[in-house]
Amino acid sequence: MISEKMYELGAKSSVIREIFEYGKKRKAEIGADNVYDYSLGNPSVPAPESVNEAIRELTLNMNSCDLHGYTSAVGDNGTRQAIADDLNKRFGTSFGMHNFYMTCGAAASLCITFRALAEKDDEIIIFAPYFPEYKVFISSQGATPVEVKCDADTLQIDLDRFEKAITKNTKAVVVNSPNNPSGVVLSEDTVKGMCEILKRKQAEYGKPIFIISDEPYRELVYDGVKVPFLTKYYDNTIVCYSYSKSLSLPGDRIGYILVPDEVADFELIYKAVCGAGRSLGYVCAPSMMQFVIRKCVGQTGDISVYKHNRDLLVNAFNEYGFKVAKPDGAFYLFMKSPEEDAVAFCEKAKKYELLLVPSDSFGFPGYVRLSYCVSTAMIEKSLPSFKALSEEYNLI
């Protein structure tokens, strides 16, 4: 009567969403100020004022039918060219509007790209720890996700494991840097090593192997860390981007797919992206948000708030005896669970109204993820609870 696979996805939501919904329930019971919810990557930094100004200007001065009507299926030409100009200025590239397909955020970008590339028996490599929905997106579009565990100490790609995982069926590799859930930024040495392996494997199998670079956190980096822009290192790179994090617009679902001219069979791939968008119903991304992006391209919210939050937590956790690698980007901390069962640890944390996400669904058991894109006041108020939790485990 129905798709059993779709029923399973609908009947059981992601662990992150389950904890978020539990947090809403607890806030209604005991008050929002008494619940310390680190579950969801929902930006607390406001969108820059230029976004609000752009919305006001557009609604006042643009014809309503044009503002809210359809753009071209691939997106507004002016918006796509503005994005191209911004990237060219920042990274020394030579993109044009023809390289971009506007989407409803990174999730749509990824699903479209997987659908465009996936054929029967294809495998797509993902690096653990990974965003849990990758497996859902890949499987739903007809390919098989293949997990490769990162180095346990650095959370950089384990290049030996990676090379051994590549087979004749490997169609693509998903790269997420800065990473969700760890905040790790892939080093240039790691990127170069990965690309050299892919070039050798392309030659060995006589076919292209694509990098799908998932980049919603590209601008969220701290302390002068540079994020290697992957199209500069490997020709067969397709970029999936979202403005949800950089401009604090998660509910407005706006992003793009970038298919560089250098990609093997560019015209074929770009048309497949268009066809995949059509088949999934992802044509004409939200028009008004496209026009907003045209005016605000290259800007970000005040990410210094996230850096302050990160430093506040890292310093406290070091004092309390929790083991955590200092992240270079995004707004997540990946903390070693003080007991082997991270799910059990998260349940104990609930006694202190601390809502943390166990790492099992990220493909890297034994850790928890904390999303620190929350208010600084909440972090400060939660620190005594973290200290009490650490004392329960005799960490200090």
Image: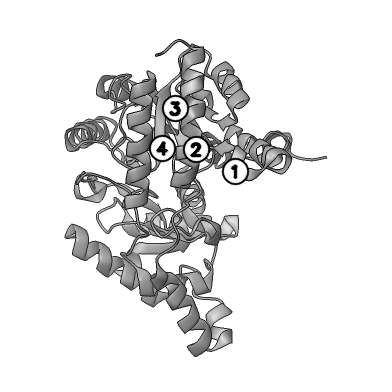
Mark 1–mark 3 Cα distance, whole angstroms, equals: 41 Å
The residue that label 2 is drawn on is: 381
What percent of the width, then of the height, locates residue 372? 44, 41
What percent of the width, then of the height, locates residue 39? 54, 37
**Of callouts 4 and 2, which one flags the residue occurring earlier in the amino acid sequence?**
4
**Residue positioned 53% across, 42% down in the render:** 40
Q: Amino acid at mark 2?
A: Lys
**Of callouts 1 and 3, which one flags the residue occurring earlier in the amino acid sequence?**
1
The residue that label 4 is drawn on is: 332
Q: Which class describes the residues within 10 Å of circle 1: few (<14), some (14-19), or many (20+)?
A: few
Front of the two marks 3 and 4: 4
Q: Secondary structure at mark 2?
A: helix
Q: Amino acid at mark 1?
A: Asp
Residue 165 shows in this picture: no
Q: Secondary structure at mark 4?
A: strand
Query: Residue 288 got which mark?
Result: none
**Of callouts 3 and 4, which one flags the residue occurring earlier in the amino acid sequence?**
3
